Amino acid sequence: MITIIVAIAENGAIGYKNELLYRISADLKRFKALTTGHTVLMGRKTFLSLPKGALPNRRNVVLTRDSSIQFEGAETFTSIDSVLASVREDEQLFIIGGAEIYKQTMAIADKLEVTLVHDVPSEADAYFPEITDEWKEVNREDFNSEESPAYSFITYSR
């Protein structure tokens, strides 16, 4: 099972200057709950943006064009195919970003776990690919929050 997990603003924005646009505690808790014990795949920039390096209790996989780069607590690969070849059949793979990695993996994902933030940020430089009609919404939970804009947890599958 390949799952893309992402927080998206209403205009598709996901980041600015290699940082998340929103820090919603419920979203971060959901991310941790869903990904702990599984494999997380990310690009080099996303790995470098992690405040404490490799995410604990997960197999961290970094996709980069530079095969000489190594990251503490993570495995490095230079192609999606080589990552997929390293994943056991019973292993769940979560794609956690960034924009280029999402673009490269949309066609192979089985599921999307989206936090849709009901807001449009004033600045963004990274965007999620369009979620087309091939994806069907299978679950949705809507939330209002005093700490952040309203948001929805949405699960899509093919």
Image (cartoon, rainbow, N blue to C red):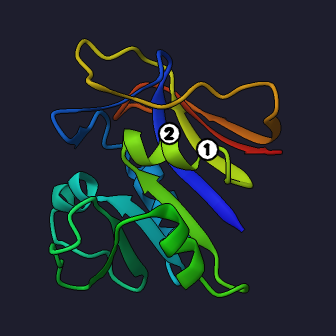
Determine the residue positioned at 46% across, 70% down. 40
- Above or below: residue 90 compared with residue 69: below
How far across and down, in percent of the image, does residue 110 sit? 74, 55
SS at circle 1: loop
Where is residue 54 shown, x and y percent of the image?
Answer: 26, 76
In the picture provided, is 16 more to the left or to the right than 108?
Answer: left
Label 2 residue SS: helix
Quadrant in the picture for residue 23? top left
Q: Residue at x 15, y 34 (%)?
A: 17
Q: Which quarter of the rendering shows the C terminus?
A: top right
Q: Nearer the viewer, residue 125 or 103?
A: 103
Q: Is any atom of residue 96 visible in this view?
A: yes
Mark 1: give few (<14), some (14-19) or many (20+) Cα within 10 Å.
some
Q: Are marks 2 and 1 in contact (CB under 8 Å)?
A: yes
Which of the numbered marks, if any, corresponds to residue 103?
2
Residue under label 1, please give it: 106
Residue 125, image x, y percentages: 26, 24
Three-letter amino acid code of the residue under disc 1? Met
Q: Amino acid at mark 2?
A: Lys
* CA distance separating discs 2 and 1: 6 Å
